[in-house]
Image (cartoon, helix red, strand yellow):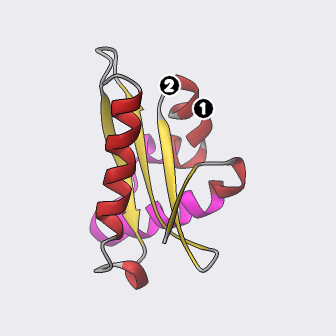
Amino acid sequence: MQITAFEPRHAEAWKRLNEAWIAQHFAIEPKDREVLDDPAGTILAKGGAIFMAHRDGEAVGCVGLIALADGGFEVAKMAVSEAARGTGLGKLLMAACIDHARAAGA
């Protein structure tokens, strides 16, 4: 597995992974739609971060960090494809979040 920072080319995978997870357990709400449709504007432009997980060139997971006013971060929109569940990918994504937050001084 490889964890990388979000790039515009990841937008469709970000949306697909999150829609699948949300739709399986909840209903997609307007606030979800905003973040899924515009991750660069709703997360990155506001000081947050997004990490994508790839296996054999395919995006199989993602997680967002929303920057908070107090200098901390909130984990948001973490999703792992069904095919990659049980592999420890969630731990890798969370480690990327923790590393980023520490480096940012959170």
**Residue extending furthest toward the top:** 70
Query: In this rendering, is residue 100 above or below 3?
Result: above
Asked whether, in this view, residue 7 is left or right of residue 106, the answer is: right
Residue 100 x, y percent position in the rendering = 41, 38
- Badge 1 crowding class, 10 Å Cα cut-off, few under 14, some 14 to 19, many 20 or more, is few
Q: Which amino acid does label 2 sit on?
A: Gly
Count of marks placed on residues: 2
List the residue tagged with mark 2. Answer: 47
Q: Earlier in the sequence, mark 1 or mark 2?
A: 1
Residue at (72%, 55%) from the top-left corner?
9
Front in this rendered view, residue 80 or 96: 96
Residue 106 is a magenta residue: no
Residue 4: name its quadrant: bottom right
State the separation of the CA atoms marked 1 and 2: 10 Å
Front in this rendered view, residue 54 or 26: 54
Residue 20 is a magenta residue: yes
Residue 72: name its quadrant: top left
Residue 6 x, y percent position in the rendering = 59, 48
Quadrant that contains the C terminus: top left
Residue 33 x, y percent position in the rendering = 50, 47
Residue 76: name its quadrant: top left
Q: Which amino acid does label 1 sit on?
A: Gly
Front in this rendered view, residue 21 or 65: 65
- Indicate which disc residue 103 carries: none
Q: Which is in the foreground here, disc 1 or disc 2?
A: 2
Asked whether, in this view, residue 6 is left or right of residue 68, the answer is: right
| Secondary-structure class at tag 2 | loop
Residue at (35%, 33%) from the top-left corner?
101
Main secondary structure found in the magenta portion: helix
List the residue tagged with mark 1. Answer: 41
**Magenta span covers which residues?**
12-33
